[in-house]
Image: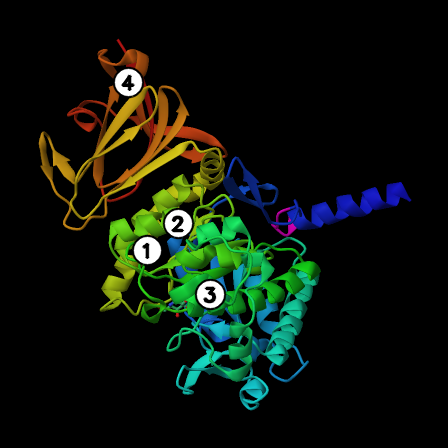
Amino acid sequence: MKKITLWISIFLLMVGTVLGQPSNTSMPKIIEKNGRHALLVDGKPFLILGGQAHNSSGWPAMLPRVWSAIEQMHANTLEVPIYWEQIEPLPGKFDFSIVNTLLAQARHHKVRLVLLWFATWKNGSNHYMPGWMKHQAAKYPNITGKNGQPVDSPSPHTKAALDADINAFKTVMAYLKGADPQHTVIMVQVENEPGSWGSVRDYSAAAQKLFEGPVPAALMKPGVLKELHVPVVSDGSWQKVFGDRADEYFQAWSIASYIGQVAAAGKAVYPLPLYVNVALRDPLTDPPATNYESGGATDNVIPIWKAAAPAVDLLAPDIYLSGSEKILKVIELYNRTDNTLFVPEAGFIPENVKYLYPVIAGGGIGFSPFGIDNDVQAENTEQFIKHLTTYAREYEAMKPMMREMANWAFEDKIRAVVEHEDHAEQIVDLGAWQATVGFGTRDGGTTKANAQPIGKMMIVKLNENEFILVGTLCHITFSPLAGNKGSAWQYLKVEEGHYKNGTFEALRILNGDETDWGGPQFGSVPTVLHVTLVVR
Ligand code: DGJ
């Protein structure tokens, strides 16, 4: 019997290899060590160099354009929606043809998938609920505004909608379990930017009754209350415990509990990593919830989401804010011991590429611009190609060393700097060395500032005196610290090259004009350098 099982395993491994699919079939999962996280794919840390398709591109006729963008970008992962209205067009009748198409085409392109379950919520509305649900507004209601006005956002207090979403999501996950033994799909996003615009919470009679009742025990824990900046009390109504934030917190709890149940049901069937993406608020000014999508997992309600939806592995910020201070703050706020950092959407503009670096350095598991298959933000085709090219250059440099990067990120070996709006140089403490990164292009001793603040640098500390540098539109120099402080120093070797099969391969040694004036400089195409320093 044992022999037969062994032969079957060997046969399956051979089939997997012959078809060009990974033979390691271990489940994708998120692991944590010393407060840092890694996404394991085929048993090893993986970095999502992603691209997200437009909202209405998850249809067979649209996919050629999507794959073309993914190929041109050198992305290793496609994030693509699957729609409830498409998958369950009639109650209980499921159609998985789009899933089959996506799986087959992703394998053909040797790209992984993150599927986005557009269901009860899509940007705060119910627009992807199937028609048979939209026809039954009383059974699947929207929320009610403060003055009784209708609001275009589904109620999180409706058991019928919750049961229908649970049933559909479980069926999706069961289908994937059967159809995807090689784990082409590595994560699933549950809903899309849930929350409500136009009303901070649901004021329907059913919701009001809950709002006037006690705050659930899961939120009354001292740790949670402290994180929510309210006094630690043992009981009370929402208004009494949370004061002027009560409406928003109630909405966050209600939506997170609903999605938590959908996620838990799907996960019980097939335990892929699951996440919820977030329409952000300004992270610096603590605005009222009337200013943003209320009830989504904005930075102030992360503890509520964690308590209400433990089956959701991570809360992931969608970056459409502008300004480096705000964006770096968001990256910091969503990088927590209890939350793996992942940016599933960022505006598809060249200014955003630089944030890939602090995400990786922070131990994040990936980054993805939104709307790669045609760019509505571009004024014309040339500009679209420019946007695509900016990401393509980055991913092309990163892709061959993706596994190394993911490992280094997990082991906290990377530091990153991005150029701020003031273009000021930045200092990085590397233990025995201090690096100073300046921005702009240099001609001899003269630096020309970058027109836009898009310079960036990633420094990987391989050991005390040896570093991998990846950068654009910046230059770097070093000075000895600690025991070597004040000593003379020089570059022992600066090699330009790339990683291949886990090893750095040098294309040339940089010296003379390329390293004088303090150190190497980086142009607009990301360059990978292997630098060794020595004190004299
Ligand atoms: C954020 C949403 O999550 C996406 O689905 C898309 O609607 C973009 N906004 C639009 O820019």
Residue 535 position (above or below residue 69): above
Callout 1, which amino acid?
Pro
Q: How far apart are marks 2 and 4 (CA)?
A: 30 Å
Q: Dot 3, crowdedness within 10 Å: few (<14), some or many (≥20)?
A: some
Split into 4 quadrants, where in the image is the N terminus?
A: top right
Which of the two labelled residues, at mark 4 and mark 3, occupies the earlier sequence position?
3
- Residue on which disc 1 sits: 283
Q: In the rendered image, which quarter is residue 358 located in?
A: top left
Q: Give the color scheme: rainbow, by chain, secondary structure or one colour.
A: rainbow
Q: Quadrant of ligand 1?
A: bottom left
Q: Distance between the residues labelled 3 and 1?
A: 25 Å
Q: Which of marks 1 and 4 is in front?
A: 1
C-alpha gap between disc 4 and disc 3: 54 Å
Taken as a whole, is the magenta stretch helix, strand or loop?
A: loop
Residue 9, position in %: x, y? 77, 45
The answer to whether the residue labelled 3 contacts the one labelled 2, judged by CB atoms less than 8 Å apart, is no
Task: Name the residue tied to disc 2.
Answer: 333
Asked whether mark 1 and ligand 1 are closer than 8 Å, the reply comes as no
Residue labelled 2 has its Cβ within 8 Å of some atom of ligand 1: no
Q: How crowded is mark 1: few (under 14 residues within 10 Å), some or many (20 or more)?
A: some
Q: Which of the marked residues, 2 or 1, is nearer the chain's N terminus?
A: 1
Numbered disc in front, either 3 or 1: 3
Task: Pick whichever of labels 2 and 4 is earlier in the sequence.
Answer: 2
For marks 3 and 2, give the one nearer the viewer: 3
Q: What residue type is labelled 4?
A: Leu
